[in-house]
Amino acid sequence: AESKDIPVTPQIATALIISPLNPNVFENSDVKLSARTNTGVIVTPSWSLANQNYGSIDANGLFTADTVTKDSPVLVTATYSGIETNSNPISGSTTINVKNLIPDVVEIKPVTGGLSIDEGTSKEFRAEVSMSNGTKFLAKDNVVFEIRGNAPAGVSLSYDPATGICTITNSNVVVTIPITVRATYTNPNGGEKAYDDAQIQLVDKIQRVVDL
């Protein structure tokens, strides 16, 4: 018997699927989107944003987030027409959540040595800030150092925002005593705060000699 070719009707795509779906992206970073039809064909669509206040997207689907003061959703729509769609326009969408970076942890760190200051000397400290995306930096602006409670006589604290260095001077304590120093960092975008309390030992010179 003579065989006959049976014509195959091509599948016509009716929708776009966007990947990744509903991703999170931190402010001032980016995420790459891609699109395929519901028939599995990868295509290059036109991209658009419902709100351009929180970021931008280029022709290749690269979304770049702007600085935000709170978590902000952005609806992204992809539109395509071609032979896969029988020239009919199809679309798909996803929502990108632009996340505000917030300070998670602050740690007071001595520039050198440990957390004690001998009488007649000074010591320098920095505030290391860990953000919600895992990045760390030594703070300069937006950080405040303070001695908690009443500072003992002969003890002073100063801070230079140009260098990010806090200097604590132990001029003449009459007895070895601990003080609590707090460093508070304020996020310049959203106003969120994080702080660290460090106990610093002020060592009396006479007591130190006795201990030796």
Image: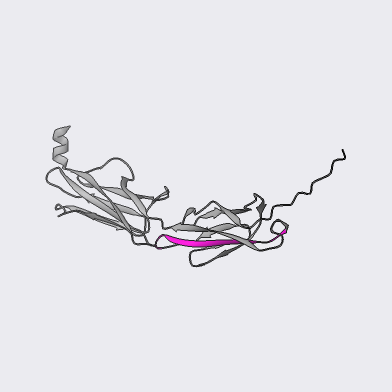
Residue 152 point in image, percent of width and height: 14, 52
Task: Please indicate whether residue 85 sits to the left or right of residue 22 in the image.
Answer: right
Q: Is residue 52 magenta?
A: no
Residue for point 24% across, 46% down: 198
Closer to us: 37 or 135: 37
Residue for point 49% across, 53% down: 23
Closer to us: 77 or 120: 77
The count of marks equals 0
Image quadrant where residue 144 sits: bottom left
The quarter of the image holding the C terminus is top left
Task: Please indicate whether residue 28 sits to the left or right of residue 15 in the image.
Answer: left
Answer whether residue 66 is visible to the viewer in this image.
Answer: no
Answer whether residue 106 is visible to the viewer in this image.
Answer: yes
Closer to us: 140 or 77: 77
Residue 31 point in image, percent of width and height: 54, 53
Closer to us: 44 or 122: 44
Residue 56 point in image, percent of width and height: 55, 63
Image quadrant where residue 161 sits: bottom left
Work out which residue is located at the far left of the displayed protein and give it: 174
Magenta part of the chain:
69-82
Task: Please indicate whether residue 62 sits to the left or right of residue 125 in the image.
Answer: right
Work out which residue is located at the far top of the displayed protein and give it: 212
Q: Is residue 71 magenta?
A: yes
